[in-house]
Image (spheres, coloured by chain):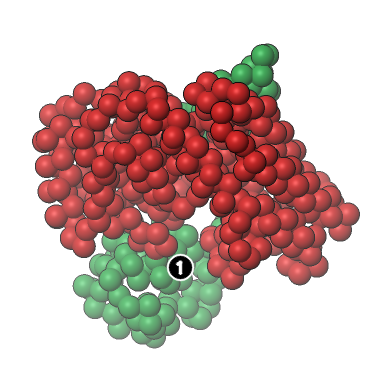
């Protein structure tokens, strides 16, 4: 890549920091050049988030239909799988899977709910009602 | 407490941390590209059967932690590297290091990294930053991919040092044990060693998932993605590949440009070995990766998406595999002058 071809499309990262790219100058010598983003990767990231939003919406629907507990919604919202959630809460994976059932979730102690709330960076009340605050 | 440490922005977190931690000892000689090349940072791997964020597990760089370890080892620098079961002990140890005047590298997860924009926060646990001081409850943080420095309170830092999931850092902390002078001759030997290791990783790992054969194999697989996964999911897979290739920390072109810069700098230490010429092959490879990314973007944006388009995408990778094979075979055949 030539130095003057380093793309400068503004990404959400570009608003906070430019990134270092390695590119060649007119003599073919490598130099560093700052880039504020590249449209190709901005759309790649948008594509990934579009998929995540679909998953979150599908999870919410499942919870509303009583097919899953609110944990499923927050797992999708926080991009977690069972293993990651087990890691953050200290529960076993099989326990997390059990807690994904609404009837089991409804019997969980405040103590256990608090662990989930912490893992999702939310509050117990918000956890139960699938309420999210932008952060 | 504040330590004599200067923040320098880099393209990639681990080679940036390595270069910055060795800056004083090397008198600024161990630049980011040198750290990347000596650490044999260039790689390609597509691990089948594993999914990351519901997409393919593809990496363009070597395993996390290897660049720092290998670079220090090649330069004969003793390393302190520790992981912790207890969060309290991890913090006490960090504070002791800072008290003793050591700036230290920390492996962290990016999901709860407060200064990253939300769009960039995934459960990726192999990010690296340097802690170089403490002010009350706040740690002074030098993240090499950022233009400036940042501050994190003890809870924020603990959270990312003990991020969970694949490659969880477990408080991993590392730093060079002493500020030893690095000689040019050591750098020359280290460059040769790094190239040799990288040649092995790209040409000689058995199986078809890693190195040049991994790129070829991915190219063949991509041609089948449209039928096998459906257009939407195939697009998501390509988007993930492009992110691994171009996202923050690669320097562009899936680290191929950093490696090109490494070979140019290596040429100054080891003239007469045509390293600068070989560098231009990596520039070409990087350019082709980016051309392929533009094509991939056409697919995940929905502008194109026929089987022919997937065939073209696969062919790009086959062509790249052939170019990188030539480049590494040329490096392999060097009789050092």
Residue at 66% x, 57% y: name it.
B214
Quadrant for the N terminus of chain B, please.
Answer: top left
Task: Give the x, y percent position of residue B273.
Answer: 61, 28
Q: Which chain is displayed in red in the rendered image?
A: B
Residue at 49% x, 74% y: name it.
A63
Name the image quarter holding residue A2.
top right
Report which residue position mark 1 lands on: A81
Total of numbered circles in the picture? 1
Name the image quarter holding residue B35.
top left
Judged left or right of residue A37, residue B329 is right
- Of B97 and A81, nearer the camera is B97
**Does B1 sit above or below residue B89?**
above
- Secondary element under disc 1, as helix, strand or loop, is loop
Residue at 73% x, 55% y: name it.
B216
**Does A97 sit above or below residue A113?**
below
Task: Give the x, y percent position of residue B252.
Answer: 60, 35
**Does A100 sit above or below residue B48?**
below
Judged left or right of residue B8, residue B324 is right
Quadrant for the C terminus of chain B, please.
Answer: top right
Task: Give the x, y percent position of residue B324.
Answer: 69, 44
Q: Which chain is displayed in green in the rendered image?
A: A
- Of B267 and B118, nearer the camera is B267
Residue found at the very far bottom of the displayed protein = A103
Residue at 29% x, 68% y: name it.
A89
Q: Residues within 10 Å of mark 1 (few under 14, many from 20)?
A: some
Task: Give the x, y percent position of residue B5.
Answer: 26, 25
Judged left or right of residue A57, residue B242 is right
Is residue A40 visible in the rendered image? The answer is no
Is residue B333 visible in the rendered image? The answer is yes
Q: On what subunit does the disc labeled 1 rest?
A: A
Residue found at the very far top of the displayed protein = A26
């Amino acid at each position: 890549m030539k130095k003057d071809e380093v793309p400068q499309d503004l990404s959400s990262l570009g608003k906070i920091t430019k990134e270092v790219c390695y590119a060649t100058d007119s003599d073919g010598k490598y130099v560093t050049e700052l880039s504020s983003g590249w449209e190709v990767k901005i759309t790649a990231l948008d594509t990934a988030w579009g998929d995540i939003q679909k998953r979150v919406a599908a999870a919410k629907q499942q919870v509303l239909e009583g097919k899953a507990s609110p944990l499923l919604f927050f797992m999708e919202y926080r991009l977690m799988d069972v293993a990651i959630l087990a890691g953050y809460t200290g529960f076993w994976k099989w326990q997390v899977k059990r807690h994904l059932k609404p009837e089991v979730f409804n019997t969980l102690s405040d103590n256990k709910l608090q662990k989930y709330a912490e893992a999702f960076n939310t509050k117990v009340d918000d956890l139960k009602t699938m309420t999210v605050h932008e952060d | 407490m504040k330590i004599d440490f200067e923040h320098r922005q880099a393209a990639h977190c681990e080679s940036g941390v390595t270069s910055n931690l060795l800056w004083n000892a090397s008198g600024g000689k161990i630049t980011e590209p040198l750290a990347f090349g000596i650490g044999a940072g260039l790689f390609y791997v597509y691990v089948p059967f594993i999914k990351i964020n519901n997409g393919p597990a593809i990496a363009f760089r070597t395993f996390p932690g290897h660049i720092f370890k290998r670079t220090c080892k090649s330069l004969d620098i003793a390393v302190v590297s520790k992981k912790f079961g207890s969060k309290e002990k991890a913090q006490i140890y960090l504070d002791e290091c800072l008290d003793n005047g050591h700036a230290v590298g920390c492996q962290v997860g990016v999901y709860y990294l407060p200064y990253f924009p939300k769009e960039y926060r995934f459960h990726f646990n192999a990010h690296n930053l340097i802690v170089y001081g403490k002010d009350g409850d706040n740690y002074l943080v030098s993240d090499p991919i950022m233009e400036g420095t940042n501050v994190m309170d003890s809870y924020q830092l603990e959270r990312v040092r003990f991020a969970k999931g694949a490659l969880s850092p477990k408080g991993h902390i590392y730093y060079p044990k002493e500020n030893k002078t690095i000689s040019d001759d050591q750098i020359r030997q280290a460059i040769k060693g790094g190239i040799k290791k990288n040649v092995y990783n790209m040409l000689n790992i058995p199986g078809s998932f890693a190195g040049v054969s991994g790129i070829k194999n991915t190219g063949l697989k991509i041609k089948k993605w449209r039928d096998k996964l459906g257009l939407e999911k195939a697009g998501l897979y390509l988007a993930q590949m492009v992110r691994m290739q171009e996202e923050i920390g690669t320097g562009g072109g899936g680290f191929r440009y950093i490696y090109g810069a490494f070979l140019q700098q290596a040429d100054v230490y080891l003239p007469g070995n045509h390293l600068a010429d070989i560098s231009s092959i990596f520039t070409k490879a990087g350019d082709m990766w980016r051309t392929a990314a533009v094509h991939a973007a056409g697919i995940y944006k929905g502008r194109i998406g026929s089987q022919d388009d997937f065939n073209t995408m696969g062919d790009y990778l086959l062509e790249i595999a052939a170019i990188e094979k030539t480049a590494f075979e040329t490096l392999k055949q060097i009789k050092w002058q």
